[in-house]
């Protein structure tokens, strides 16, 4: 049994709790929180909740710690610190800061002789590994990543910060015609606007100026101005009823050529269609918990990414079983 | 520079020759053949062709040997034998005999302190690794593999063995409605007939009994009887003009659920659309040549499969570059 701890009990922490139940070789030891422990109610009633201050005292009870905090401020501090005491997995997703995060986490993990897997999830994560496979198989080609249809938390938050907006949700939607052009091997140059649409569902406060709100959304730089954006005003009831889920997904495509005269085209496509973004991310994390545990047992310490993990480490099956059943 | 040798110069060998040109960190040292070497004309005129008997004498000149023989009789002998002297990569694709092949190749590679990667290509190969990723991420789910649209060499051969058939090509075609049912998350139980169609293009000898030929094809056990098969009689000119390519492809899907009440559905889909089956297979092999070379340098010897290869070994980029650009 691999004994797993969770730090942080939001959507992702709940997803990890749930995913552990689907993996019979793992058990959840405890959840750690910065909130008052008694205020945190788990789905698994028998599992204890402790204050984060207790965490290091429990290091003998936990084989792998999953860090479920945010990438902006939590993980840059937590992962390097806890990698000194635990094998850890995080889902750090600020792409531009991954090199820096790697360095600090590596120092912590090396100090403690632990294995730290960072940026595990689907993007970064499974999408990254598919970009890598696509690039090495078809070195002469182009990469395309499309996201959606799915809820973007960052864009939904941006809508809700506008004056007169009570609530809102934003969907990122890949443009079908762009996706089809890539699939036909046309290797299109695509602008930001050509790749994705943004669709917003907004609950306005009573008496708010809808035209101003719509205009503020559509012209917001970095978030919406570069896209074709549509805005729908709906009631709170409709938002709650129709837009409470956290679906997401996307596509990674590699289009390339082979042959002495580059005469043959090839298309590799990887796609995800997810009812729950945090639960799927958590499911990827939990598979990599197994890898972190095993790699540490084999002396593979320090910070690693999804690129450094041989697929066999992810499965509870033996090498022999894998070769027989899945190869 | 990774110095690569090729044994066997058929479609796959030519594909490897071509793929090496697309990878600037590799060079083709020589091609080895069982035919008279002077009868083998490479696309790369400057590369020497030698009789297979010379191969072991050249072991200091080759970092990785790619075995491009057939799975029925060539590879079961060649891979274990040459793994004593070379790091090797093969594309052994008789699924049921992989465990046995692994054992003999492992003994050879261990004896020589070499690294042997077997069953590299797309199925077995990229499809296998996607089945594994799908299974570990969504442990409660179902796997589906569809092949095509593509030419099946074995089925085309079977047609050509029928009396009165001069030439023929067979396409394996996935059934769209079955694929769509899987994508909708219906988890259908699919029979052989429901998953694939078989379409045959046949050139009959003059005066041959077309009805008998069509009937013999459609009722051939194991090859066609279990499928909905269509037969088109065409001229040799049409066959040559329209059916000379070797396209293939397919789909690996994993459909699964997450959540405390298994209330969320997820779909992972990996697909390939290939103009040239042997060139794509060769392109996968050549990426794994790099891995074999590096893994051997790190002391990872013996027989390995695609499951044992961390993705980072496949790329000419450093870990730092990968984290910066692809993660």
Image: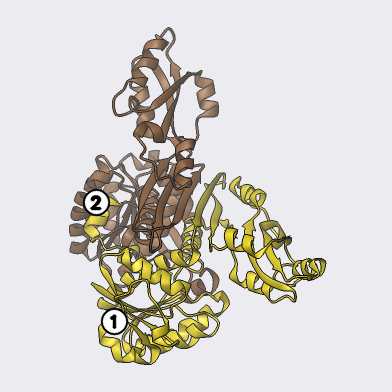
Chain colours: A yellow, B brown
Describe residue A275's horizontal placement relative to residue A302 as left or right.
right
Q: Position of residue A86 (x, y in %)?
A: 33, 84
| Quadrant (top left, top right, bottom left, bottom right) of the N terminus of chain A | bottom left
Disc 2 is attached to a residue of which chain?
A: A
Q: Tell me the residue at 38%/58% (across/down).
A: B138
Describe residue A252's horizontal placement relative to residue A47 as left or right.
right
Q: Tell me the residue at 51%/67% (across/down).
A: A123
Up/down of B303 relative to A32, above or below: above
Q: Residue A62: which numbered mark, if any?
A: 1
Q: Position of residue B302 (x, y in %)?
A: 24, 63
Q: Closer to the camera, B201 or A230?
A: A230
Disc 1 is attached to a residue of which chain?
A: A
Q: Earlier in the sequence, mark 2 or mark 1?
A: 1
Quick one: label 2, few (<14), some, or many (20+) residues within 10 Å?
some
Q: Say which quarter of the image contains residue A282.
A: bottom left
Q: Tell me the residue at 29%/75% (across/down).
A: A46
What distance separates the C-alpha of mark 2 from that of mark 1? 32 Å
Q: Element type at marker 2?
A: helix
Q: Position of residue A255 (x, y in %)?
A: 56, 52
Q: Position of residue B35 (x, y in %)?
A: 32, 39
Q: Closer to the camera, A168 or B222?
A: A168
Describe residue B10's horizontal placement relative to residue A324 as left or right.
right
Would residue B29 be seen by someone viewing this image from the given angle? no
Up/down of A72 relative to A268, above or below: below
Q: Residue at label 2?
A: A324
Quick one: label 1, few (<14), some, or many (20+) residues within 10 Å?
many
Q: Element type at marker 1?
A: loop
- Marks 2, 1: nearer the viewer: 1
Q: Are marks 2 and 1 in contact (CB under 8 Å)?
A: no
Up/down of B141 relative to B237, above or below: below
């Amino acid at each position: 049994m691999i004994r797993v701890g969770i730090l942080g009990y939001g959507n992702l922490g709940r997803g990890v709790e749930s995913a552990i139940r689907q993996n019979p070789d793992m058990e959840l030891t405890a959840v750690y929180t910065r909130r008052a422990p008694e205020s945190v109610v788990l789905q698994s009633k028998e599992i204890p909740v402790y204050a984060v201050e207790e965490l290091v005292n429990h290091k003998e009870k936990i084989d792998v710690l999953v860090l479920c905090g945010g990438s902006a401020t939590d993980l840059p501090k937590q992962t390097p610190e806890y990698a000194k005491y635990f094998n850890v997995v995080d889902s750090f997703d600020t792409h531009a800061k991954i090199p820096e995060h790697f360095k600090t986490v590596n120092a912590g993990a090396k100090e403690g002789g632990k294995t730290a897997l960072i940026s595990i999830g689907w993007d970064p994560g499974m999408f990254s590994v598919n970009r890598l496979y696509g690039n090495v198989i078809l070195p002469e080609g182009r990469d395309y990543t499309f996201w959606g249809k799915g809820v973007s938390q960052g864009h939904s938050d941006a809508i809700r910060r506008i004056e007169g907006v009570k609530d809102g949700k934003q969907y990122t939607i890949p443009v079908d015609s762009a996706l089809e052009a890539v699939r036909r091997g046309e290797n299109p140059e695509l602008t930001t606007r050509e790749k994705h649409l943004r669709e917003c569902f907004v609950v306005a406060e009573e008496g708010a100026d809808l035209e101003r709100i719509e205009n503020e959304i559509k012209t917001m730089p970095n978030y919406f101005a570069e896209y074709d954006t549509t805005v729908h005003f709906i009631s709170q009831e409709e938002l709650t009823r129709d837009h409470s889920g956290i679906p997401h997904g996307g596509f990674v495509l590699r289009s390339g050529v082979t042959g002495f005269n580059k005469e043959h085209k090839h298309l590799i496509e990887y796609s995800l269609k997810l009812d729950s973004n945090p639960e799927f991310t958590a499911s990827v994390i939990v598979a990599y918990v197994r890898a972190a545990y095993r790699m540490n047992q084999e002396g593979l310490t320090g910070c690693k990414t999804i690129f450094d993990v041989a697929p066999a480490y992810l499965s509870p099956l033996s090498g022999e079983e894998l070769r027989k059943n899945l190869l």
